């Protein structure tokens, strides 16, 4: 279940239970002839039903829904009016209000709203004996504190679980799921704004030989170190993703082809010139592509990166190969300098 779906169910349930409870209170007050409290409880029940309906209508945007605070503020105002009429009877209505605030609102909003309502209630209840007000205040503070602690633990756990779903535990980089979601968003943004978008696939060269020499158990330390270096080398707004088996994707928004080639070559040199744990010295190849106008497919961009990486491997590893529709460009790590022209594109080999 997603966070949005869970919040929707929690909010609807909270409003529904609140509405039912105050509807029962309204009926009881009507039977005892407490007509002011009857209307007050009925108003709270109606607002609660309205809140449940609003939650259902906003079920796909619960994380950004704005009307919960005004609705709960109206409930609090109604309860304060009832406390002014019958302080001893209506003061207990503050308890469900505090709970509902913490179930529906963000913790800070809930605590601030609850504190304001409780403070106003204490002022309104000035004619009530001090010990009764003190006992009520103590009970409300204990309830608010306990509920806030549980709400904080829930939000902390939810954020932690959300992090686990997008972070690769082995390297600390983002994972495949996060790549697909983020790349789709960036493609949509690029299509809407016209800005460039580039993607690169980095692969550690000769991984099978490294695995045979050092064993599978040692390689995670190497991949974690590479991920750390990539994170430090990336620009603000860029991100890297680990797909397993020594493969990292680099997502570069607002980056055109020439910028991509420069960044990819810099990263290739970084990998080749650094000293690493386990293997000490390694090389990497990168397959790169830049989004073309009108392109909206995540699959096609990733496929071009894979094809570009395969071409880099075919040409001797430790290479950067850029692939777009109809054109191929390569920046090689070889020590010679050569330029050749072909009908399909050009290959450039540059010295380290």
Image (cartoon, rainbow, N blue to C red):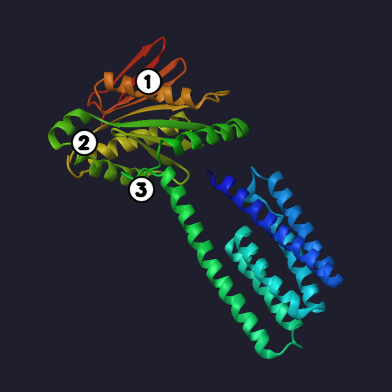
Q: Which mark is residue 307?
A: 1
Residue assigned mark 3: 232
Where in the figure is residue 298, as x and y percent of width and height? 49, 27
Q: Nearer the viewer, residue 235 or 97?
A: 97
Q: Is residue 134 left or right of residue 51?
A: left
Q: Nearer the viewer, residue 183 or 268?
A: 183
Residue at left offset 86%, top offset 70% = 35
Where in the figure is residue 120, as x and y percent of width and height? 73, 78
Q: Residues within 10 Å of mark 3 (few under 14, many from 20)?
A: few
Q: How many marks?
A: 3
Q: Nearer the viewer, residue 337 or 234?
A: 234
| Vertical placement of residue 51 versus 85, above or below | above
Q: Is residue 64 left or right of residue 219?
A: right
Label located before the other in sequence (3 or 2): 3
User: Within the image, what quadrant is residue 199 found in?
Assistant: top left
| Vertical placement of residue 224 versus 126, above or below | above
Q: Residues within 10 Å of mark 2 (few under 14, many from 20)?
A: some
Label located before the other in sequence (1 or 2): 2
Q: Residue furthest front?
A: 31
Q: Residue furthest left?
A: 213
Residue assigned mark 2: 282
Q: Secondary structure at mark 3?
A: helix
Residue at left offset 43%, top offset 44% = 165
């Amino acid at each position: 279940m997603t966070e949005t779906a869970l919040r929707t169910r929690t909010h609807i349930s909270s409003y529904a239970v609140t509405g039912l409870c105050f509807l029962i209170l309204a009926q009881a007050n009507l039977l005892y002839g407490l007509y002011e409290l009857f209307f007050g409880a009925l108003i709270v029940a109606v607002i609660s039903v309205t809140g449940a309906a609003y939650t259902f209508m906003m079920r796909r945007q619960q994380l950004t829904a704005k009307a919960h605070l005004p609705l709960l503020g109206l409930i609090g105002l109604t309860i304060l009016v009832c406390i002014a009429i019958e302080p001893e009877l209506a003061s207990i209505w503050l308890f469900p209000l505090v709970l509902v605030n913490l179930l529906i609102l963000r913790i800070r909003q809930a605590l601030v709203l609850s504190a304001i309502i409780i403070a106003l209630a204490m002022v309104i209840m000035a004619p009530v004996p001090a010990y009764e007000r003190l006992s009520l205040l103590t009970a409300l503070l204990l309830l608010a504190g306990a509920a806030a602690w549980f709400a904080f633990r829930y939000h902390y756990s939810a954020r932690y679980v959300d992090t686990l779903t997008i972070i690769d535990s082995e390297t600390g980089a983002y994972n495949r799921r996060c790549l697909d979601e983020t790349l789709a968003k960036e493609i949509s943004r690029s299509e809407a704004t016209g800005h460039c978008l580039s993607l690169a696939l980095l692969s550690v060269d000769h991984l099978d030989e490294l695995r045979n020499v050092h064993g599978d158990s040692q390689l995670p330390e190497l991949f974690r170190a590479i991920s750390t270096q990539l994170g430090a080398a990336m620009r603000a707004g860029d991100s890297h993703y680990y797909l397993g088996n020594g493969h990292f994707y680099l997502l570069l928004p607002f980056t055109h082809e020439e910028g991509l080639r420069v960044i990819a070559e810099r990263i290739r040199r970084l990998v080749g010139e650094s000293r690493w744990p386990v293997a000490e010295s390694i090389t990497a190849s990168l397959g790169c592509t830049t989004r073309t106008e009108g392109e909206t497919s995540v699959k096609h961009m990733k496929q071009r990166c894979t094809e570009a990486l395969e071409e880099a491997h075919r040409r001797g590893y430790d290479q950067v190969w850029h692939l777009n529709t109809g054109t191929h460009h390569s920046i090689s790590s070889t020590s010679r300098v050569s330029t050749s022209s072909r009908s399909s594109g050009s290959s450039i080999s540059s010295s380290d």
